[in-house]
């Protein structure tokens, strides 16, 4: 897919589903994030994969959201 086409077709997801995501899809997403460029080439990133409602609640306790 061409870059301009990707830009034109991008969208934000505002609704989150309770449906589990396949492990292969999670791995593909993590790999895409790993190789994606970062602002000013700053490499430190933290990506969390939360698989349970309990882990989501724990994260909420640590954030202001």
Image (cartoon, helix red, strand yellow):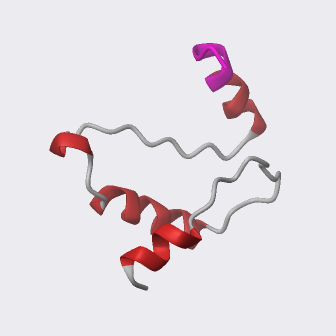
Pick the quarter of the image with the N terminus.
Answer: bottom left
For the point 69% across and 53% down, the residue is 13
Residue 48 locus on image (x, y percent): 50, 41
* Left or right, 49 with reference to 19: left
Q: Residue furthest right?
A: 18
Q: Residue furthest bottom?
A: 1
* Left or right, 2 with reference to 64: left
The magenta stretch is 59-65
For the point 41% across and 75% down, the residue is 4
Which quarter of the picture shows residue 45? Answer: top left
Pick the quarter of the image with the C terminus.
Answer: top right
Which quarter of the picture shows residue 19? Answer: bottom right
Which quarter of the picture shows residue 23? Answer: bottom right
User: Is 48 located above or below residue 64 in the figure?
Assistant: below
Q: Report if residue 33 lies within the magenta region.
A: no
For the point 38% across and 76% down, the residue is 3
Number of numbered callouts drawn: 0
Residue 51 locus on image (x, y percent): 67, 47
In front: 10, or 49? Answer: 10
User: Is 22 located above or below residue 64 in the figure?
Assistant: below
Residue 36 locus on image (x, y percent): 31, 59
Residue 5 locus on image (x, y percent): 47, 79
């Amino acid at each position: 897919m061409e870059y301009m086409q990707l830009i034109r077709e991008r969208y934000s997801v505002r609704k989150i589903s309770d449906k589990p995501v396949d492990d292969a899809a999670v791995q593909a997403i993590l790999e895409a994030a790993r190789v994606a460029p970062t602002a000013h080439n700053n490499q430190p990133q933290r990506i969390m994969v939360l698989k349970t409602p309990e882990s989501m609640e724990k994260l909420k306790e640590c954030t202001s959201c």
